[in-house]
Image (tube, grey):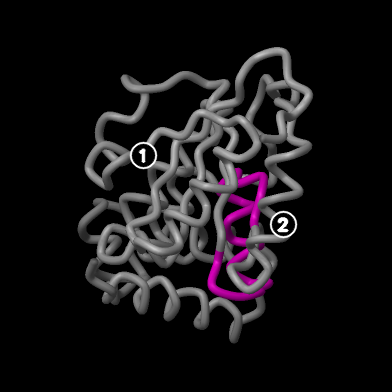
Amino acid sequence: MNTPPHELTPKVVLYEPRYLLHNAISNIFNDYGWNVFDIRADMFVEDFCSITDKPALIALGMHGTGKNIIPFLQAIHRFSSMNYQIMIWLPKQDNAFKRFLTTLGVRYIFAETSLYEELTDFAATYSLPEQPKNRPKTMLTDNELAILLDISKGMSVASIANQRRCSNKTIYALKRNARTRIGLDAHEWLELLSKISKIKSIDF
């Protein structure tokens, strides 16, 4: 067994419901001396902070979130603001979705098409970085993310404004700020919303 040069045994909290992919990822981490903790969707969303500590890496497959993608994205954003280190893998290279995840505070983003090589290198060489004291300015705000997710559900600006008891102008401003912060043009924005909706339709 190869052991990475860490003073402490590294820990990873793993969420990946796809059986074969889960086993392959778990084996890679185990081979390099990591402690692997599996977590259920409900535990990730509702009770994560009570079962682990910040030195643990959070690792999950985006497509594995399925119908829970929206609460997962909200939780990822929250954990990033608490300085947890997060790794996510996508089915393939996707620059727009990658930029979106970056604005949620995700530090490590891989593609499943090259996951074995990237994850092997990562597990062998990883060391905990220093924790930033403040949320980076490039991260989406809570309100910007909330509006993006509401729109991805198919809600109109008027219905969102009515639900949040604010003006349409405020919702348009938050939508514009979110798109600008992520760095998406109009076509990429619509594709991102469509992908979130598509993942939401997957049931595991």
Which residues, given as a range, are shown in magenta?
90-109
Could you say which quadrant of the image residue 29 lies in?
A: top right
- Specify whether 4 is left or right of 145: right
Q: Position of residue 42 (x, y in %)?
A: 22, 43
**Outermost residue to the front:** 1
- Circle 2 sits in a helix, a strand or a loop, which is it? helix
Q: Residue at the spot x=29%, y=76% of the render?
A: 154
Q: Position of residue 67 (x, y in %)?
A: 25, 65
> Does residue 50 sit above or below 140 in this rendering?
above
Q: Earlier in the sequence, mark 1 or mark 2?
A: 1
Point out the image quarter for the C terminus. bottom left
- As rendered, which of 178 and 118 lies closer to the eye? 118
| Residue 43 on image: x %, y % | 26, 37
Task: Name which quarter of the figure residue 30 lies in.
Answer: top right
Depicted 13 relative to depicted 187: above or below: above
**Point 52% across, 82% down: residue:** 191
Q: In the figure, 21 relative to 121: above or below?
A: below
Label placed on residue 38: 1
Q: Tell me where residue 47 sits by quadrant.
A: top left
Q: Is 99 left, or right, of 37 in this rendering?
A: right
User: Would you name the residue on which mark 2 appears?
Assistant: 118
Q: Would residue 155 be found to the left or right of residue 56 on screen?
A: left
Q: Nearer the viewer, residue 82 or 204?
A: 204
Packing grade of label 1 (10 A; few <14, some 14-19, many >=20) is some
Give the amino acid type for the residue marked by disc 1 in the picture.
Asp
Residue farthest along the bottom direction in this orientation: 187
